[in-house]
Amino acid sequence: IVRSDLFLRQDDTRTLAERYIETHLPAGATILTQPYSAVLTPSREGLTEALTRNLGSAEAASTKFQLQLALDPYPSPAYRLIYLGRGGLDAEKIYVDPADLGGSAGLEPLRRLGVTYVLVKRYNRPDPETSAFLTALAREGRRVAAFSPYRPGISEADQARIDPFLHNTDARIDDALERPGPPLEIWQLNAPGT
């Protein structure tokens, strides 16, 4: 019980990534992220853009978003957030389908959206849906930070076998884990042609 309590007191990888972003990336930067990743504050402009795109105007948004937009002072740092996924009922999110990334298009759809940084969740086993995107990211980007839940010295083979501990799952706290949360990486996109 003591070991479990000490483990759960460690900062989650998502908290570490959030701190890194807030201290190293410029406020207002456009970041591609994923749901259930680090909790980042959307910029007022980015939130207005998403609400307008999904609802026709920010004025059509729910009271929750009206109150968020009216905050004065607005929380800082804040970022223009784009989400990797197929979308859904989230009025405040702009999504990019992973199927549109990689291949001959590379990361051009992200560049058209002004994305300069990518916060990506890794899994201990490859995800076929994001493999072309991750290949393009390795070719057209530069990894600037990584946050692992595994203890130093844990082999890639062991990491592939041992699930990270996520609070909303029934994953066990394995001795190979140092902290909760998924593996996370922050990438900066290269300028076109570099």
Image (tube, rainbow, N blue to C red):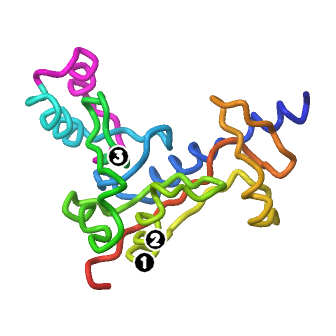
Residue range in magenta is: 59-80
Q: Secondary structure at mark 2?
A: helix
Residue 67 colored in magenta in the image: yes
- Quadrant housing residue 49: top left
What residue is shown at x 27% (from left), y 31% (from top)? 73
Density class for disc 2 (Cα within 10 Å; few <14, some 14-19, many ≥20) is some
Q: Which residue is mark 3?
A: 83
How many numbered discs sit on the rendered protein? 3
Q: Which mark is residue 139?
A: 1
Estimate the spatial distance between the alpha carbons at disc 3 and disc 2, rounded to whole Å: 18 Å
2 and 1 marks in contact (CB < 8 Å) = yes
* 180 sits to left or right of 14: right
Q: Which residue is mark 2?
A: 135
Q: Earlier in the sequence, mark 3 or mark 1?
A: 3
What residue is shown at x 83% (from left), y 36% (from top)? 6
Q: Secondary structure at mark 1?
A: helix
* 135 sits to left or right of 89: right
- Quadrant housing residue 140: bottom left
3 and 1 marks in contact (CB < 8 Å) = no
